[in-house]
Structures are given as C-alpha cells and as structure tokens.
Image (cartoon, rainbow, N blue to C red):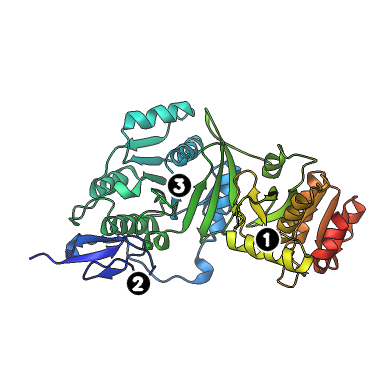
Amino acid sequence: MKQTNFICQQCGYKSLKWIGKCPECDNWNCFAEEVVQKISAKNRPVPDVLSKPELLSEIRSISNLRIKTDICELDHVLGGGIVEGSVVLVGGAPGIGKSTLLLQVCNVLGRKGKKVFYISAEESVQQTKMRAERIGLKDNLYIVSETNLDIIIGHIKKICPDVIIVDSVQVLYWDSISSAPGSVSQVRECAGRLTFLAKNSGISVFLVGHVTKDGSLAGPRVLEHLVDCVLYFEGEDQTNFRILRAIKNRFGSTNEIGIFEMTSLGLKEVANPSEMFLCERPKQTSGSVVVSTMEGTRPLLVEIQALVSQTNFGLPTRRATGIDFNRAALLTAVLEKRAHFALQTQDIFLNVAGGVKIVETAVDLAVIIAIASSFKEKPVCANDVIFGEVGLGGEVRAVSQANLRLNEAKKLGFERVILPKGNLRLLEDRFVDQGLSLVGVADIGEALDVIF
C-alpha cells in the first residue's frame, strides 16, 4: 500500500492527513495529496568534480565573474550583471514579458560569443523562433522543447552552454518521482537538481516561474530559498510599462527596480523613470503631490493623487492603490486628530500614478498633503517636492538618503522641497547654491502652513 502525504502548496508543510488551514503559513485550502516515494541513492545527482576547501584569499571576486547583458535596467536589478553559476528565478503574470526579456538577453549574449541554451518547456521550437525573429535574434542560441529533466541534463552536458534558460520550471518532471509536473515534489527536485548543476559547473541558470491568482510565485516556498535571485515582473494591463523588481538577491541590493516599456520589437528600457511617471501630471489640480521615494538605491519621483468628496452613505468609503491601506487609514486619523480636519463624512481615494507600489514611510507627509489639498480644493505648487515620515503625534521625522532624493528633484527642474527639519540640518549647502529651495518642517501643522 502506497503511503500518501498532504503537502502545502505555499510553504511545503507536510501533514499525514488533509487539513483546511496550514498551521505554518495560515493559508486555507492549500494542501495537495502526493504519493510518498523513496528515491534510491543511485538516482541522486553525483558531482563530476569533488569539492575541496579553498583559502579565502584564493577565491575569485564576484566582480570578475559577472556577464554584462548590456540591458542597463536588468544589469542594475541584478547588481551589475549575471553572476557565473547563479540561479535566477523570474516570475510574473502570463504575457507580461518574461520570455521576451530573456530572449533579448540571449540576443546580447549571443553577440558576445556566449553559448546560450533555451529550454522551451511550454512552447514548440517554432513558436519560440517566431518570437526570437521579432526581436532580431539569430545566432548562438540552442533551443529544445523538452520537459524530461534527465534528457535536458543530457543535452546540457553535450552542449556545455554558458547560460541556461528554463521556461518554465513548473512543467518539468523527473522520472524518479511519480507525482505530476507542477507538484511540490517535482518543482522542488527539478529546481534543486538545476541549482546543483549550476553551482558545480559554473553555468548561469534562469528559471521562469508561474504565479498564482494573488500574484505570488506558484509552487513551494523552498523554490525561492534555493535560488540566488528572485525577480518579479509587475505591470498593469492598461499600460505598456513594466517594472522588474528584485525581492531577493545574494549578489546585490534587494528591492531594486528596472523600468521597461513593451513595444512591438520587445521590451525597451526607460532611461528616466521619474520623467516617465510625471509626464502626464496635472499642474493646477487639487490633490496632486510629487513625492521623492527610494526603490532600493534608486530615487524616483512619482505623483500621489488624492480625491476627497462628501459621502452619500452613512459609512465613508476609503480606498488606496499603490499605498498600504492600513498606513493610509493611520495617516487619515493623524490628519483628523492633529490638524482638526473633519474627514468623518468624507470618502477618500488615494492612488500612486503609473502603477508603482510604494512601501516606505517617507511618503507619509506627501499623502497627508494630498488629502488636505483635495479637501481644501487648493492645489499644491507644481514645482514642489515633498517627503517625510509622519508619527502618530503629527511630528515629521527624518528619512534616509535625503541627498539622493534632492539630486533627483534638482535633475527634473523642481524648485522647492518640503522635507523634515532633521534632514535639513544634515544636508550640504550645495543644493541651495544650485537654486533649490529647502524648507524644513517639524510637524504637519507647520507643513500645511508652508504649503497653503
């Protein structure tokens, strides 16, 4: 009689019986039944070269092991290029541009003389060729349509490529496991063997991953722990702009983003994201505020929009897009209590233009000013940039990397910056010499007086 386990599809937690809620990750209805099968030792991957200890001084630096893709936005997100022997997981909604971007990487690497092996596990080689011809890719790319991992590894050992792209890891299967492709066991073992191959051969591997309906990567959570870098593609269906975000990177900074525009010839990188986000900003409209935010090490200027209107029902409606809803509710309460705004009967809608999601607290002051501007029907000066964290007492707290935020504001021609007094004391005088007016505020009452 075969033994079965129930495994959580989100975190990999194992149970002997089916349960409705996972005790590890608190998700509901996420358990799948799988047959337990012991894998013999002979089926385990064996390294071609035995590992040996090395002196730290004899190990080559990572900076010498990177391969530039010449796609500046992608290199920026990866931390400077593709690291030899690294494993990168790329996730995103269907049709958002994952395969297109990776084929553009193949095109650049092929021109540099690198040998690239593309495993098209979901499409035929003819379909992949059609997409490759659209972006002008021709040489130094080996393509195979295969899902059997043993056959794929045989091809890899025969070709000896520099870079491998697997599209996608959820449809691969290993004969030694009886469960279906896409199951927790299959995804974990296939990704584990490819990672093992990358670390022992120095081949860089890109894995394309499916996403669930809530936008997270499908498969066990251990998949993200196995790889060196996790990249997420974000973007709205109504726009052509795509955001590539690094949420994990062992070779660079996390939360870096790259901005791309989808065109008929593939993904085109956006050289100045701040200018792109502000190109359609209304100049004399209440509720519109420009804020300087940080995405990793990159400063971005984005527009925060607020709409405050009289509610038609007993309970006012509150909505937030691109900003954490709980944080927006907290800031609304601070504005009501500390600045005496009567918002109890007002519907409040907040939006970050351009589809950007902001998680840092440095946008607090801009959110409060946007709500106040819409409530008072008084527009904020079009040449103002605002940033600062707001506490529950209404105080405006200093934020990190103020110099980078001011540089971005100056580069785009803004004339005045409203910022915390704590940052103003530590800033250099060169911003004033360059014609940028800096106004420090200690609380939201002082900020409202300065702006209105």
**How many numbered marks does the figure carry?**
3
Whole-percent x, y for residue 329 in the image: 63, 62
Q: Residues within 10 Å of mark 1 (few under 14, many from 20)?
A: some
Check disc 1 and report the residue beneath it.
344
Check disc 3 and report the residue beneath it.
92
Residue type of the residue flagged with mark 3: Gly
Task: Please state which of the two labelled residues, at mark 3 or mark 2, is closer to the viewer.
Answer: 2
| Distance in Å between CA atoms under marks 2 and 1 | 39 Å
Instruction: Judge by depth and name the residue closer to the eye, 61 or 69.
Output: 69
Residue type of the residue flagged with mark 2: Pro
392 relative position to 64: left or right: right
Residue for point 64% across, 49% down: 351
Task: Please state which of the two labelled residues, at mark 1 or mark 3, is closer to the viewer.
Answer: 1
Callout 2 touching callout 1 (CB < 8 Å): no
Tell me if residue 76 can be seen.
no
439 relative position to 270: left or right: right
Residue that sits furthest to the left in the current view:
1
Q: Determine which of the numbered discs, if any, sits on residue 23 in the image.
A: 2
Between disc 3 and disc 2, whose residue precedes? 2
Q: Secondary structure at mark 2?
A: loop
Instruction: Judge by depth and name the residue closer to the eye, 8 or 116.
Output: 8
Between disc 1 and disc 3, whose residue precedes? 3
Whole-percent x, y for residue 234 in the image: 52, 46
Q: Relative to 215, does residue 114 appear above or below in the rendering? A: above
Callout 1 touching callout 3 (CB < 8 Å): no
Tell me if residue 359 can be seen.
yes
Q: Residues within 10 Å of mark 3 (few under 14, many from 20)?
A: many
Q: Relative to 160, does residue 254 appear above or below in the rendering? A: below
Between disc 2 and disc 1, whose residue precedes? 2
Whole-percent x, y for residue 184 in the image: 29, 58
Task: Please state which of the two labelled residues, at mark 2 or mark 1, is closer to the viewer.
Answer: 1
Callout 3 touching callout 2 (CB < 8 Å): no
